[in-house]
Amino acid sequence: MKLAKPTLNNVTGPEYAVFTQALLAAMPRLRRFCYTLTGSYVDADDLLQMTLERALEKWQSFEAGTEIQRWLYRVCRNIWIDEVRSSKRRGTSESLDDVDELEYAAAGESQLINSLTMDEVAAAMESLSESQRSILYLVGVDGCSYKDAAELLDLPIGTVMSRLARARKNLADVLEL
């Protein structure tokens, strides 16, 4: 079922203004999360746009008091899962663009691993599965707790912990740390 485009009747008022301000403030972190899922700046921007469109369409379903970043991550992840499933049904594969820098997507890791070049970190991150990359981003870069990451990804906390451990080990193996 396709939702109607927002009209002036349902997008006015102080609640919508507060929502859009929070949405704008959340965009940089959301873009980094999109890149973490896709591994491509172009695909990340497309995913970001789809996420923002969906958020604006569904803005009234956002519950006041809920952290908007968590709500947006969930919306984004659901869209990404739908896109991956859709591409599998079509029989096409997603190709990742070559990444020259990972500064935007992994600023937190660049501070921790000073001796590595951004290209090395980018290649190592791309070698991880999407599930490992997203958990590593949420916990390692975005600073989410295990519990928050589990809620965002709709996974048991034990699964988050084991995937994070495997992601860290795989990343260390690839980077020969």
Image: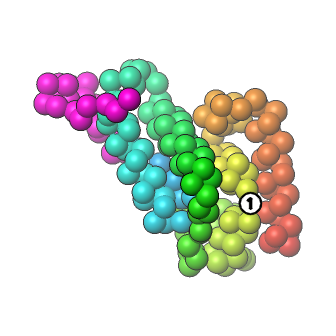
Report x, y in % for residue 7: 16, 31
For the residue pair 59 and 29, the one nearer the viewer reads as 59
| Residue found at the far front of this picture | 90
Residue carrying label 1: 128
Q: Position of residue 46 (x, y in %)?
A: 42, 57
Element at label 1: loop
Above/below status of 151 relative to 48? above
Specify whether residue 6 is painted magenta. yes
Q: Position of residue 19 (x, y in %)?
A: 31, 32
Q: Examine the rendered structure and indicate whether residue 115 appears above or below residue 169.
A: below
Instruction: Look at 47% across and 48% down and name the residue there.
Output: 30
Find out whether residue 67 is within the magenta segment.
Answer: no
The answer to whether residue 165 is left or right of residue 113 is: right
* Residue kind at label 1, given as amino acid type: Leu
What span is colored magenta in the figure?
1-25
Kindly identify the residue that appears in the image at 25 percent across and 24 percent down. Answer: 15
Q: What's the colour scheme?
A: rainbow
Horizontally, residue 66 falls left or right of residue 109, namely left
